Image (spheres, grey):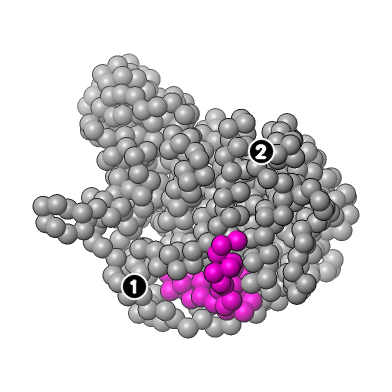
Amino acid sequence: MKERAPRAKFRTRRPRCLHLSLNELNMTEASTIKAGDEFAAMFQGSGLPALRPATEGRRGNTPGPYIKLVNARILDGTGAPPWGPADLIIEHGRITGLAKAGKAKPSDSRLTDDDFHVIDCAGKFLTPGFVDCHAHIGAPFHAKNGRQPSADYVYKLWLAHGVTTVRETGCFNGLSWTLEQKEASKSGKIDAPAIRAYAPFPATTDYVKSIHTPDQAMAWLQAVKQAGADGVKFFGAPPMIMKAALETCADLGLGSCCHHAQLAVGRMNALQTARWGLSSTEHSYGIPETLLEDRTLQAFPTDYDYGDEYLRFAAAGQTFLQAAKPGSAKWQSVLEGFLEAKHTFVPTLNVYDANRDLMRTRRADWHERFTDPTLWAYFQPQRGGHGAYWYRWSTTNEIEWRETFRLWMRFVNDYKNLGGRIGVGSDSGFMYQTYGFGYVRELELLQEAGFSPLEVMRAATAWGAELLGVAEDTGSLEIGKRADVLIHRENPLTDFKLLYGTGAMRLNDTTKTVDWDRSLEKVIKGGVVYDPAELLRDVEEMVTAAREAA
């Protein structure tokens, strides 16, 4: 498909200053709030409401209970190279047949070709739907800069980029809110990926701290499990509470992930929590701390203040620079320690991409057409906005972050080569990363880190499903799994830029003009067929309407 080029100019709204109250919830207040809703209550108390939920689905097309995709090339997500031509059969939202063209048979021999809706995929490629292992359905932070879009805006951008499953890492709109949206997606009431809900653990130093003992932690975990949470997101906690909580997560069958916040990492780094049973480490925090050799803590600048977002992120670009070098004995022993713990990393490299080249990231092709104006305003330099620290960003900062990326990418790639698992996560909604687009950028960055395109595809599908505990249901094209299938006009392994909603810039030698080519033709989620171009038009209309109303 050919897309028009993005317009050259972008109107920037002047952001209002963001001052977020981070008062603790005391024991009395916490007792009146449902487990998993504590962070949402904190945001609400600071005047930052949850997003408006999606309430209806208008774009999914169900052509019938029986669908057959014929003559396709298959990239099944397991790491196998493309093969075909092949036919894939979908019955009642499940894959029931996959074989060489003409050989796939329906589960019921009484079914004939007339019973099937047939899609000819000759010359096209099928992959599993993508899994976003670190996603946020918006963020209440944004509300200080204007009216937020509804969750529908976020969901459509994800689906339009092939994301059919997300792990909501934090449920900042509230666990209750997220579970309602999860059920609405599952029942087909809204156009949205399948949602895995990870409740935020309320034992943080600077946000919500209503848990003070291991017993309270275990009781809270039992409550969120009973409520329907799929897992828990940690930011750190006192070690005895963290250890007890992770052991309880394992006992209850709850997944776990952690952003090892600098205020907590001095008491336990990522390797310690991995050994206690943590499922995945998010971002890079806590990793370089495991690699320190001549000290046990990062050497912070003398003027450091974690509450100053610039100082926080500037210093975060220096930790790997103080750590053991790639290939050293310390480097190898740490990698082997994580591997022994069967740990997973979800780097979210893309959300830090602006740190090494701010100008490039803020002028990305998609902002003009697809970035909501409130989100754009939030991205601008402002005091107090999480991740909006550009008021002092410098050439030195970018140089340090480029070296940090080199080391971080080497660590991630070495871990993969050693046999460790990497998940693809976007963490969009911060630092000039727009939903959906940030996910594709993460694929590009993993390839830059040293992953082959086929390894990137495996991380984005099968490995993500394994981490989220849904590998029996999705993540690969196999009989019995949910029909989460992407139809590509071209082999996506040739160029991940073809997955962007804006497409890849190409010269048309006939017209001597620029075309914007896209490969993603159809997105199938559980047998429901979506047109990415239609979803993107909806988003563009939302953005235009929001600008006009501003």
Query: Compared with residue 459, is residue 408 higher up or lower down, i.e. above or below?
Result: below
Label 1 crowd bin: few (<14), some (14–19), many (20+), radius 10 Å:
some
Report whether residue 126 is seen.
Answer: yes
Q: Which mark is residue 86?
A: none
The residue positioned 62% from the left and 52% from the top of the image is: 283
Amino acid type, callout 2: Gly
Report whether residue 95 is seen.
Answer: no
Residue 405 pos. (x, y %) = 57, 53
Q: Which mark is residue 544?
A: 1
Q: Is residue 285 magenta?
A: no
Q: Which residues are magenta?
A: 372-400
The residue positioned 53% from the left and 61% from the top of the image is: 356
Q: Is residue 391 magenta?
A: yes
- The local secondary structure at tag 1 comes to helix
Task: Name the N-terminal-most of marks 1 and 2.
Answer: 2
CA distance for labels 1 and 2: 51 Å
Q: Residue beneath label 2, please?
A: 327
Is 61 on the left-hand or right-hand side of 209? left
Is 406 on the left-hand or right-hand side of 247? left
Query: Compared with residue 392, is residue 403 higher up or lower down, i.e. above or below?
Result: above
